[in-house]
C-alpha cells in the first residue's frame, strides 16, 4: 500500500531561522512527488513537482529535494508570511482514463514568529 | 482570470438532508476530482472524472454522488447516507501537459452538520 508520512507534525521557527520539513514515502513506481502550501481555510496551492532522485527545485525561500525514499522542503531565512501547512503527495499508478492518483501526507504546520 | 471556484464557502446541513457542493473550472482541464480533508489527516479521494458523462469512485465514495454533464462542472452531493459528513471539501482539476501532470485546487467548502 502506498504511504506518505510527513514530519514533524508542527514546527515553530523564529524569523530567519532556516529548517527542513520531511516527507517519507513508500510507493511502488514513483511517478511524481508534489509539494503544496495550504493556508488556513483555503485550498492547497501547488509549489513543486519532483520526478527522480537527485532532482531539486527552488522558489524564493523554498527548495525541494528528492531521494529514493524521501523528500525535503528546505526553508531558508523564513518570514512570517511563510507560515502555512505544507502538504506532500506522491503519484504512483494512474487512475481509470488517465486521471491522476495522488496519495497525500497529513501535512506539516509551519509557524514563523516575527 | 482562470481558476477553480467552489460554492458555497460554508454550508450547514441538518441530519437527514442531502446537500450539493458546486465546483466549476475554466481552465479547460479534462480531469476533475473531489477530496475530503479532516483535521490531522491527508486529503482523501471521493470521486473523480476524466471526461464528460463518466466518473469513478475514489477511496471513500460511500454516501456521496457526483455528475459530470459539462466539462467545466463537477458537483458533489453529500447524501443522508454519509454518516460523518462534517469536513472540508476540496475540488481539483488536472491537466497532462509537456509530460507533467499537475492538480490544481479550488478554495474549498466547509460543511458542518447541525
Image (tube, coloured by chain):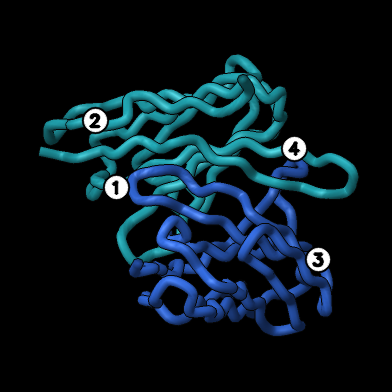
Chain colours: A blue, B cyan
User: Please, what secondary structure does the residue beneath circle 4 have?
Assistant: strand
Residue under label 1: B87
Tag 3 subunit: A
Residues at marks 1 and 4, CA–CA distance in whole angstroms: 26 Å
Check if mark 1's residue and mark 3's residue have beta carbons within 8 Å.
Answer: no
User: Please, what secondary structure does the residue beneath circle 3 have?
Assistant: loop
User: Please, what secondary structure does the residue beneath circle 2 have?
Assistant: strand
Residue under label 2: B11
Q: Is residue B70 above or below residue B32?
A: above
Most distant residue in the right direction: B98
Say which of A11 and A80 sits in front. A80
Residues at marks 4 and 3, CA–CA distance in whole angstroms: 17 Å
Residue under label 3: A51
Residue displayed at 50% across by 35% down: B106
Tag 2 subunit: B
Q: Which class describes the residues within 10 Å of circle 3: few (<14), some (14-19), or many (20+)?
A: some
Q: Is residue B51 left or right of residue B19?
A: right
Q: Is residue A70 left or right of residue A107?
A: right
Residues at marks 3 and 2, CA–CA distance in whole angstroms: 38 Å
User: Please, what secondary structure does the residue beneath circle 1 have?
Assistant: strand
Amino acid at each position: 500500500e502506498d504511504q506518505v508520512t510527513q514530519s514533524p507534525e508542527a514546527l515553530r521557527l523564529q524569523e530567519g531561522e532556516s529548517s527542513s520539513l520531511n516527507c517519507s514515502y513508500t510507493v511502488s513506481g514513483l511517478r511524481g512527488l508534489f509539494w503544496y502550501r495550504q493556508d488556513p481555510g483555503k485550498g492547497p496551492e501547488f509549489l513543486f513537482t519532483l520526478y527522480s532522485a537527485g532532482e531539486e527545485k527552488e522558489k524564493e525561500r523554498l527548495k525541494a529535494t528528492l531521494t529514493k525514499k524521501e523528500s525535503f522542503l528546505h526553508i531558508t531565512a523564513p518570514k512570517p508570511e511563510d507560515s502555512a501547512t505544507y502538504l506532500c503527495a506522491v503519484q504512483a499508478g494512474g487512475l481509470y482514463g488517465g486521471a491522476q492518483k495522488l496519495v497525500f501526507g497529513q501535512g506539516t504546520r509551519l509557524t514563523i514568529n516575527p | 482570470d482562470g481558476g477553480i471556484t467552489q460554492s458555497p464557502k460554508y454550508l450547514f446541513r441538518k441530519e437527514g438532508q442531502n446537500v450539493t457542493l458546486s465546483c466549476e473550472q475554466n481552465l479547460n482541464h479534462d480531469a476533475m476530482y473531489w477530496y475530503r480533508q479532516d483535521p490531522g489527516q491527508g486529503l482523501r479521494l471521493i470521486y473523480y472524472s476524466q471526461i464528460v458523462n463518466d466518473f469513478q469512485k475514489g477511496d471513500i465514495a460511500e454516501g456521496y454522488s457526483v455528475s459530470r454533464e459539462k466539462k467545466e462542472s463537477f458537483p458533489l452531493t453529500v447524501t443522508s447516507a454519509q454518516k460523518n459528513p462534517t469536513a472540508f471539501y476540496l475540488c481539483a482539476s488536472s491537466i497532462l501537459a509537456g509530460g507533467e501532470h499537475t492538480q490544481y485546487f479550488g478554495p474549498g467548502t466547509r460543511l458542518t452538520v447541525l
